[in-house]
Image: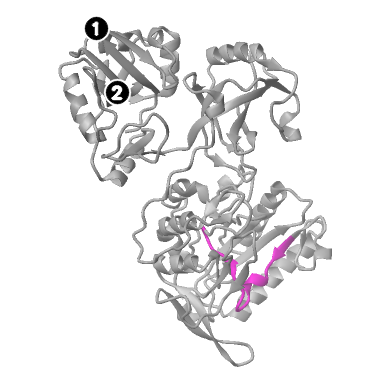
């Protein structure tokens, strides 16, 4: 189990005990109860490695630990997980399992202030899933045969249920509310080129914490920013010397490499600011697919640092949610063999080069010839495409069983560059209402790029000419009725200040991006189904990215999207 607390070394000798941080600071005075309990261990001498925690609702909680330390350090507990020395014998070179076997008997009969940290051999994925489900921070995986090392090695791997880590505080912004010490902390991280800006955190502060922080910030004040900060973020900011370290939970790093949806957890006084770097994200879960992904560490999106292996893991995990929309449908692929920053291309035909998991269906072309179009029906098929450099999946509006009868219409709302996302959302809502007025139910999907797709599910009844005709007449009617807002003309010159209602996706052979597909764009946004009610509060068509796998899985299996994209309806006769 990964404990949400302070790492500590406890030295016991001569009936006394001292508590040190991992950097060697003597913090015995901050943890008097732990020191007193450790002094009672039945040993001549020992050096014990562990984690000091405080509990909230039965779980270790870092914020509660901070409060307990400031109140005198009572009510805390030490979980001991390693033994470096015992009665004069140096154990550091011994295997971890042997050290823990020597550690366990020391805690027989002790109270809950000092405890032995249990472990499980194997079953790491099951343990991780169980810990996350119960609301714990995560797990630490350790090599059972490893000697003790005082520095970070590959022998220990931390896997967290939510993203959280330390940041360096580089400044603060003023609040417009009376009595509030500041609005947000400005954050930084150390990297290969020194300290860099990493975003802001403006939530998670109690009143007492805010007052204490403001006093500390004032003592560290300086006139200039310690790093280059974007002009918008620097406006009205106050700067401090980069010495404070804050523990922060957050949703992800954005395309600009700053934190999103950050929440303050507490200050870390046990770690120097110079050691604070971006932690390596957890490896994706092991694949159960028969498809081998070569070059899994290849970066395919430099902005989000998404790798080929992580893209494959995303698609494998999302397959149950994606296949109802993707399977058994003629598809086109956006392939970027060297990553999205290099050359990408569409591919829609195949004669077997993708392997046995990717199929083809022969479709008659306009000139009378027949071409083999791609389709897949399994997660292995998706991964076979990823192995060939695929990032995006785009689908026909019909299935291979009857390619001539569409089962959906798609209106892609593509805004002119000068328009904001609020304009697109209002447009989507209006189109929904116009469709409802003629008896059609529709659903919104964030494109993961610039706009919104309004999707109209259909019974596969009408043929392509009728669906194309309806979509074109609907879009042109809107363009004529509200010429200052909409256009149905794809020419760039016609789009200035307006939203292009792309109806051309509703013709035989055209494709549209499918639900939950990762886009080959900066930041790896995802085409995400949403409800009409939540669309109003979403701030970007790329609000979800490939990093949001857990959130997207939870949403796909949730009640609000249970019937998304389904309706037993046919085209009205208008």
Residue in the picture at 51% in, 77% down: 461
Q: Position of residue 130 (x, y in %)?
A: 30, 40
Crowding at label 1, few (<14), some or many (≥20) Cα neighbours within 10 Å? few
Name the secondary structure under disc 1. loop
Crowding at label 2, few (<14), some or many (≥20) Cα neighbours within 10 Å? many
Residue wearing tag 1? 14
Mark in front: 2 vs 1? 1
- Which region is colored magenta? 500-516
Name the secondary structure under disc 2. strand
Q: Nearer the viewer, residue 172 or 362?
A: 172
For residue 292, above or below residue 66: below
Residue found farthest to the bottom? 368
Quarter residue 106 falls in: top left
Position of 373 with respect to 289 (left or right) is right
Q: Nearer the viewer, residue 178 or 251?
A: 251
For residue 40, above or below residue 404: above
Q: Which mark is residue 79?
A: 2
Dot 2 and dot 1 residues touching (CB under 8 Å) = no
Q: Position of residue 500 (x, y in %)?
A: 74, 62
Quarter residue 98 falls in: top left
């Amino acid at each position: 189990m990964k404990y949400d607390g302070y790492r500590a070394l406890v030295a016991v000798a001569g009936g006394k005990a001292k508590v040190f941080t991992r950097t060697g600071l003597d913090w015995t005075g901050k943890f008097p109860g732990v020191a007193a309990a450790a002094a009672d261990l039945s040993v001549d001498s020992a050096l014990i490695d562990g984690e000091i925690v405080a509990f909230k609702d039965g779980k270790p909680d870092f914020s509660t630990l901070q409060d307990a330390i400031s109140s005198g350090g009572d009510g805390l507990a030490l979980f001991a997980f390693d033994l470096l020395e015992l009665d004069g014998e140096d154990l550091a070179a011994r295997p971890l399992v042997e050290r823990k076997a020597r550690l366990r008997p020391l805690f027989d009969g002790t109270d809950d202030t000092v405890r032995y940290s249990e472990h499980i051999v194997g079953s790491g994925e099951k343990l991780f899933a169980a810990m996350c489900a119960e609301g714990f921070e995560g797990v630490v995986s350790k090599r059972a045969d490893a000697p003790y090392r005082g520095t970070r090695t590959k022998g220990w791997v931390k896997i967290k249920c939510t993203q959280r880590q330390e940041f360096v505080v580089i400044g603060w912004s003023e609040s417009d509310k009376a009595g509030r010490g500041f609005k947000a902390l400005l954050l930084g991280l150390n990297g290969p080129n020194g300290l860099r800006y990493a975003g802001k955190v403006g939530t998670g502060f109690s009143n007492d914490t805010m007052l204490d922080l403001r006093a500390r910030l004032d003592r560290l004040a300086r006139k200039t920013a310690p790093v280059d900060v974007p002009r918008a973020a620097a406006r009205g900011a106050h700067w401090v010397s980069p010495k404070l370290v804050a523990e922060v939970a957050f949703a992800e790093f954005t395309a600009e490499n700053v934190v999103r949806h950050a929440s303050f957890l507490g200050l870390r006084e046990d770690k120097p600011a110079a050691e604070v770097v971006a932690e390596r994200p957890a490896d994706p879960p092991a694949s159960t697919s028969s498809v081998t992904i070569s070059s899994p560490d290849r970066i395919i999106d430099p902005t989000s640092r998404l790798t080929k292996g992580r893209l494959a893991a995303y698609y494998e995990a999302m397959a149950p949610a994606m296949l109802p929309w993707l399977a058994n449908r003629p598809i086109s692929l956006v392939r970027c063999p060297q990553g999205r920053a290099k050359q990408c291309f569409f591919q829609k035909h195949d004669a077997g080069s993708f392997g046995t998991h990717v199929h083809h269906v022969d479709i008659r072309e306009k000139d009378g010839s027949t071409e083999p179009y791609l389709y897949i029906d399994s997660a292995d098929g998706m991964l076979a495409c990823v192995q060939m450099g695929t990032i995006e999946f785009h689908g026909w509006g019909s299935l291979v069983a009857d390619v001539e009868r569409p089962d959906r219409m798609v209106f892609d709302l593509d805004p002119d560059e000068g328009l904001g996302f609020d304009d697109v959302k209002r447009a989507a809502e209006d189109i929904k209402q116009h469709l409802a007025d003629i008896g059609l139910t529709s659903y919104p999907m964030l494109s993961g790029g610039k706009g919104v797709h309004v999707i109209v599910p259909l019974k596969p009844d009408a043929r392509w000419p009728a669906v194309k005709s309806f979509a074109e007449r609907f879009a042109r009617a809107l363009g004529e009725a509200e010429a200052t807002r909409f256009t149905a003309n794809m020419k760039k010159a016609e789009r200035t200040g307006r939203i292009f209602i792309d109806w051309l996706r509703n013709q035989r052979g055209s494709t549209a991006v499918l639900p939950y597909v990762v886009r080959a764009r900066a930041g790896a946004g995802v085409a995400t189904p949403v409800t009409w009610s939540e669309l109003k509060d979403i701030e970007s068509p790329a609000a979800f990215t490939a990093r949001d796998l857990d959130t997207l899985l939870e949403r796909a299996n949730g009640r609000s999207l249970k019937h998304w994209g389904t309706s037993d309806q046919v085209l009205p006769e208008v």
